[in-house]
Amino acid sequence: MLNEIITEIKKAPKSIIEKPKFRIRERWNMPLEYQGQLIMRHLKLCSYGCGIPHYFFDLAEDILKSWIGILYAIKSPILAEGENIIIEKLKIEAGTFTKEEAAEEYEQLNNFPQHMLPIRVFESFAGYGGASFGLRRSGIPHVVVGMSEFDPFASQLLSQNFPNIRNWGDITKIDAEELPDFDLFTGGFPCQPFSSAGMQLGVDDPYGRGTLIYHILRIVKAKRPQYLLLENVKGLTQRKFADTFENIKNILRELGYGELAYAVLNSKDYGIPQNRERLWMFARLGGLPAGFDIVPPKEILTHRFGDFLDQDPPKELYLSEAQIEHLKVKHHIDSFVVEEPLCFDVYNKKIKKDALCITITQPEHNSLRVIEVPGEDGREIVRKMSIDEQFRFMGFHDGELNYEGQSYSQMSKRAGNGWDINLVGKLIKHIFAQL
């Protein structure tokens, strides 16, 4: 119903849209899709019985009344059943919250700075949309106005999960002047040139991946977004790449972004039992406020490796007895008998007895195996990690990502290159609370 209404309003002539009675405050600084998000959050909280904080409540009610007025003005067939039926259908579509979800949603909206409503986002090197999923987790009102991803399999994944958002394709071919305006630019530019698992050739990478950061800076120079959030492996901070990293920081200073805030954050410190260290970088046009700290408060880890595993994994993931024996001989492992499910670190030839997952990587690195507790027959059980398991370790809830039609190797590649959306949500919420 929401999409049908938005489609109808987009058909309305300018002479109706610009009538004073329909021009509701900040409404005209918001894309229609964001207006719809706000209405649905409002209706969903109202269904629980509390409504959203007063500023957002009034704004959502004003937008809804304005929408209904426009639909009447253009004699939309949607109103054939009457506006009350339309609102009831929207309420059903919005769904309901649990008590805990309602409290969290209310707090997020109540604490969000009103002057920053909404944040328009452009996500480069999008992969599966890690920044967009992370923003959803943060609770910060936003609208994604565009993405950039050239890999055909990743692009298909984006179209399945973000069907209404344009993918601008290869960042090297984007004419920045053609892009829509946006407030936040995000990008996890290719990490292989700086990664310990790659060739570590930096800007001399033979595939040109080490210089793609400069296409980010080219677009930032042209569009001048208010905020910039970037991600890479911690290897970028090593002495070997000091000149490249310093050059990035200098260019941002010259563009008026002040000092780049950056830190290496680990997923295991924010609720996910994966040892995944990534470099996070943030800048604001005009510079960051005094005392700004990019590092969110660390959390006590309450989950273990086994908590993120399937109850009934696909049978084809399991290694045969011969394959297990080969693995033991090759990596000098005496036994795969464990008392709880654990991760086997193939690269470092050891069982992770701390109940953490090693860093999820691309499948060609073949870096981990899942060790299960032996059955009644005492046989050792070792297998590959399923797609669902990999994405749980990347912060996803089951069913949150639609990967229909994608192969195991392609989805493993997405996970290995992707963002931990649980960490991203907490990081973004922490950042904007200080602005």
Image (spheres, helix red, strand yellow):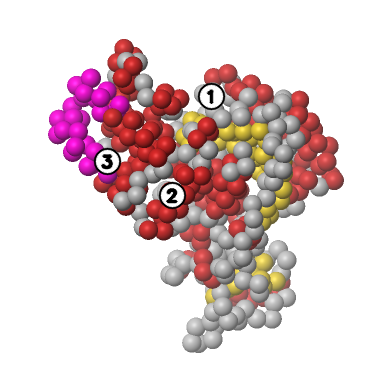
- Inspect the magenta stretch and tell me whether residue 89 lies in it: yes
Q: Label 2 amino acid?
A: Glu
The kind of secondary structure the magenta stretch mainly shows is helix
Q: Is residue 226 above or below residue 406?
A: above
Where is residue 185 shown, x and y percent of the image?
59, 33
Judge whether residue 74 can be spotted in this image: yes
Q: Label 3 amino acid?
A: Leu
Mark 2 and mark 3 residues within 8 Å of each other at the beta carbon = no
- Residue that badge 2 annotates: 105
C-alpha gap between disc 3 and disc 1: 29 Å
Q: Nearer the viewer, mark 3 or mark 1?
A: 3
State the extent of the magenta-drawn residues as a range. Answer: 66-91
Q: Mark 3: give few (<14), some (14-19) or many (20+) Cα within 10 Å.
A: some
The quarter of the displayed image where residue 79 is located: top left
Where is residue 159 shown, x and y percent of the image?
44, 38
Residue at 54 percent of width and 71 percent of height: 306
Query: Which is nearer the eye, 88 or 406?
Result: 88
Q: Residue furthest bottom?
A: 377
- Inspect the magenta stretch and tell me whether residue 83 lies in it: yes
Residue at 51 percent of width and 69 percent of height: 307
Quadrant of the frame with the N terminus = top left
Q: Residue furthest top?
A: 15
Judge whether residue 383 can be spotted in this image: no
- Residue that badge 3 annotates: 90
